[in-house]
Image (cartoon, rainbow, N blue to C red):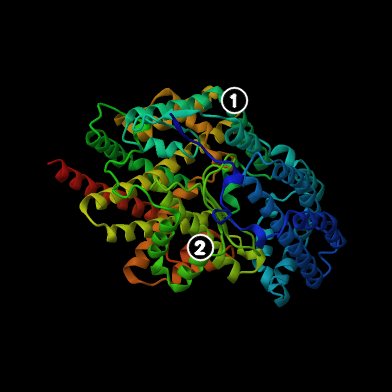
Amino acid sequence: MSLNVCVPDRSAICPRDTWNLKAIFSSESDWENAFRKLKACHTEILKFRGHLSDSPKTLKRCLELKREIDVLNERVCEYAMLRLSEDHSNEKALDREARLVSFTPHLKRTFSFIAPELQRIPENVFIGWLQDPSLEEWMSFLRRILRTKPHTLSEPEENLLALVGGVLEGSGTVFSQLTNVDMSFGYVHDREDANHKIQLTQNTLTSLLIRRNRTIRREAFRKFYQEFSDHRYTLAAALAVSVRQDVFHARARNFSSAQEAALFYDDVPLSLYDCLIATVRAHLPLLHRYHGLRRRVLNLSSVHVYDLLVPLVDNAQTSIPFEVAVEKVLSAVAPLGKEYVSVLHNGLMVERWCDRYENKGKYSGAFSAGSYSSPPYLLMNYRKDVFSDLYTLAHEVGHSMHTWYSSRTQSFQNYRYSIFLAEVASAFNEILLTEHLLSKASDLPAYTYLLNRQIDDLQGSLFRQTMFAEFEKIIHAAEEEGRALTLDFLRSSYRSLLDAFFGQEVVVDDVAELECLRIPHFYDAFYVYKYATGISAAVTLCNKVLESGETAAYLGLLRSGGSQFPIAALQAAGVDMNSSEPIQAALHLFANRLEELEALLLVQEE
């Protein structure tokens, strides 16, 4: 009799393994009441239209009302998003999301008079107002308004952009629904147990690609990408439309490119993006060397893409229940102090911040999300047999604790930190986890496995994300030059990058080109480079904490939230992202770990 490992329905998940969203709204009816209130009250701010230049007092009253509306809107949106992420087939959740998508352009249109009206105030008057004590808490917000003046349109034009926003931003929704709900990948025969079949999903793929049995890896890889191949034209069209949307918005706001537009709001220079790509490309021989080591250790005549995740060393600890994973993470972050550890323990084990396990229709992957007035929730699809999920947990709680510190230190308008900074906090925790586990390794195989694991982490966060970043730059530039983003163009562009980054040690099967159609972050343009800069800054910061024991600078970075631009915030914490030094530091760590791994595996082979 065959025993199939199936993904359960949402209703079958134990409540203690789900997040407790009652801190946002105690019931769905409370959400409905809040949404009605939001729709009714948001237009109250229009009474300030035409009067923002009257006085600092009038401006302050307007901004305070806007904050009240924003706080309510954030709660309403957060609840709807989290409920939908639980199960994308839930009709009530889909209905809530659809109503919000319809309402959001109206809210943006209501607020659309604020920036243009402020920017019409004579600059000398505006700068004088910035010295007014009553506006001190709004200083960062107002300075950003002034900075965006060249890219802010007239009020009717801003109104129009807000109105069409929901219409123009549907490609990501199409991608999400297609890949999370409609696509079905079938089952993989477990050749290590003839009585088992394993359901193949976006979440179970990784656990299959780390299997020792190459036949299982190959079958999982080919079946998975066959489903993407069956939908390749639809997915290519969705990605092309998303890029076209990015270019439209950039041109509408007088940016020279979509890349410039994406980096502008974090005050990140284009030179940093180019420096990242150039610095990583200069060190590709290190990555090729690692792939060569993989071929030798696995005793393969050639390495294929489906061979790249299997560990070179077996992990003796094959099963880590969620509760044990939490304890390991708590021990790893102990250098950050008692408060950090205590708050995190309470959040994960008492207050139910985390939605732990996979169910049908659930968002694939993991994320952290919270509002100013709610806990910093995190979504997982935790699998006790996938060691990398321990690291995913450490990564996501890095985000959650960043939100916790920021929301308790900053005002609402300053608490939202940029993704650029967010990826520093998450990578920082992963490095701490590795250092902790290495220090506790019970034998040489365990130590060697962890070295291999960190090399793979750096490969994924630094090399792989930089490759993604270069792909985004290529396809956006092509759209701006008037080239058609056809399926063939997307595949060939991605193929050239795979060949460069993998080198001659890896056989790139044609189907691997379809990976460019399955990356959710490509629908949030120029996001992925922040993983690479994040790990780079995190290496430097972690070195400082572990070498000196001094945590004030790092915790100060978490508390700063969005009160500064990310480059300035990191500079204050002791990291100069305007140079290649942080990237070089991360690459230096990769090189050192690789050298150590090569030496240990050579000894073991002998």
The answer to whether the residue labelled 1 contacts the one labelled 2, judged by CB atoms less than 8 Å apart, is no
Residue picked out by circle 1: 484
The answer to whether residue 103 is left or right of residue 399 is right
Q: Quadrant of residue 435?
A: bottom left
- Where is residue 416 drawn, in percent x and y? 61, 60
Mark 2 residue type: Met
Tell me the amino acid under the disc marked 1: Ala
- Taking 231 as reference, is 86 above or below it? below
Look at 57% across and 64% down and name the residue there: 351
Question: Whole-percent x and y of residue 376?
Answer: 58, 60
Location of residue 25 in the rendering, given as x and y in whole percent from the top left corner: 70, 59
The secondary structure type at the circle numbered 2 is helix
Q: Name the side, left or right, on which 392 lies relative to 238.
A: left
Does residue 246 appear in the picture of this structure?
yes
Residue sitting nearer the eye, 340 or 14: 14
Q: What residue lies at 35% left-to-right and 33% top-to-bottom?
A: 502
Q: Residue at x 61, y 35 (%)?
A: 181
Q: Earlier in the sequence, mark 1 or mark 2?
A: 2
Residues under labels 1 and 2: Cα distance? 51 Å
Using the image, tell me which numbered label, if any, was put on residue 349.
2
**Image position of 338 with respect to 151: above or below:** below
In the depicted view, which residue is nearer to us: 338 or 249?
338
Q: Residues within 10 Å of mark 1 (few under 14, many from 20)?
A: some
Viewer-proximal residue among 306 and 212: 212
Figure quadrant of the N terminus:
top left
Q: Residue at x 25, y 29 (%)?
A: 300
Bin the neighbour count of mark 2 within 10 Å (Cα to Cα): few under 14, some 14-19, many 20 and up.
some
